[in-house]
Amino acid sequence: MTAENDTMQLETYLEKGGVLTSPGNVPARYRGELMRIMASFVDSELAGSAGFANVINDAPGIKERISAARIVLEKTDHAERVLKVMGEFGVDQTRYATHHDWAKRMARDASLDSARSGTDMRLPVFHFPIEGWVDAVVMNVLMGEATGVQLSELSRISYAPLAETFRAIAAREARHAILGYEGLTKIATTEEGRAKAKESVAYWRPRVAASFGHAGSERFDMLKRLGLRHEPTPTLLMRWSLLVDARLASLGLS
């Protein structure tokens, strides 16, 4: 049997819902795409954690500071969990956490195209700076809903150890979204708060939407054959948009 036939049989197995369980039975192309997915998640969690850490002291009360600190801690922990899976593929876990400046941000008005050309693999949204508490809460709500949708996809990934890790992470990320919504609810009780929140929504919404990637990507079909993707980008983006619309409408922020 040729290597090409082996690859075709593996793709058929994965496309029908099969899973892989260890680095030893992962072919080169699959490994490359899997590492790309993991690196993007880890980089995004580290960058998100670092960016949110800078606004803990902007929180208006003790409860809000505790919530913000918990999000910073748990996002870093999530990065470590996925990094451990990467470590099974030979990644130097010790060096990884310090090989980029995770708190570094572009100018507030930088273009999305420039954000996509960063030196690490964080999602573009994490290249933009947060300005103050209201801005942080709005970003957390919008990105929290996006992370929930994205993790629903990642939790079905065909590499079983990673899928299990993502399922465990999803429960805590859902809690982060709830904390954000609680904070935004409080902000929206005043006219001034609603005005600031609407301004932040207008800024962050297109940047968070960009985290879903390009619609119609040629890579999607290949990733689907490998069991690394299941639903197309427009479906995930629409699901997120409907969730966000409902959240904002409930607070008078549409």
Image (cartoon, rainbow, N blue to C red):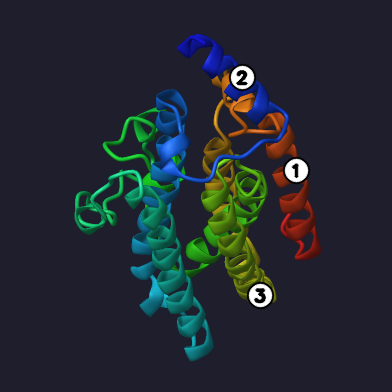
Position of 200 with respect to 130 (left or right) is: right
The residue labelled by disc 2 is 9
Nearer the observer, 34 or 219: 34
Q: Is residue 215 visible?
A: no
Please tell me whether mark 2 or mark 1 is closer to you in this view: 2
The residue located at (69%, 33%) in the rendering is 230
Where is residue 119? Give x, y as percent. 26, 36
Amino acid residing under circle 3? Glu
Category of crowding for the residue at label 3, using alpha-carbon neighbours closer than 10 angstroms: few (below 14), some (14–19), many (at least 20): some
Where is residue 47? Give x, y as percent. 36, 54
Which quadrant of the view contains residue 109? top left
Which residue of the protein is positioned furthest toward the bottom in this rendering?
62
Nearer the observer, 137 or 212: 212
Where is residue 21? Give x, y as percent. 53, 45
Amino acid residing under circle 1? Arg
Q: CA distance from mark 2 to mark 1?
A: 33 Å
N-term-proximal mark, 2 vs 1: 2
Q: Secondary structure at mark 2?
A: helix
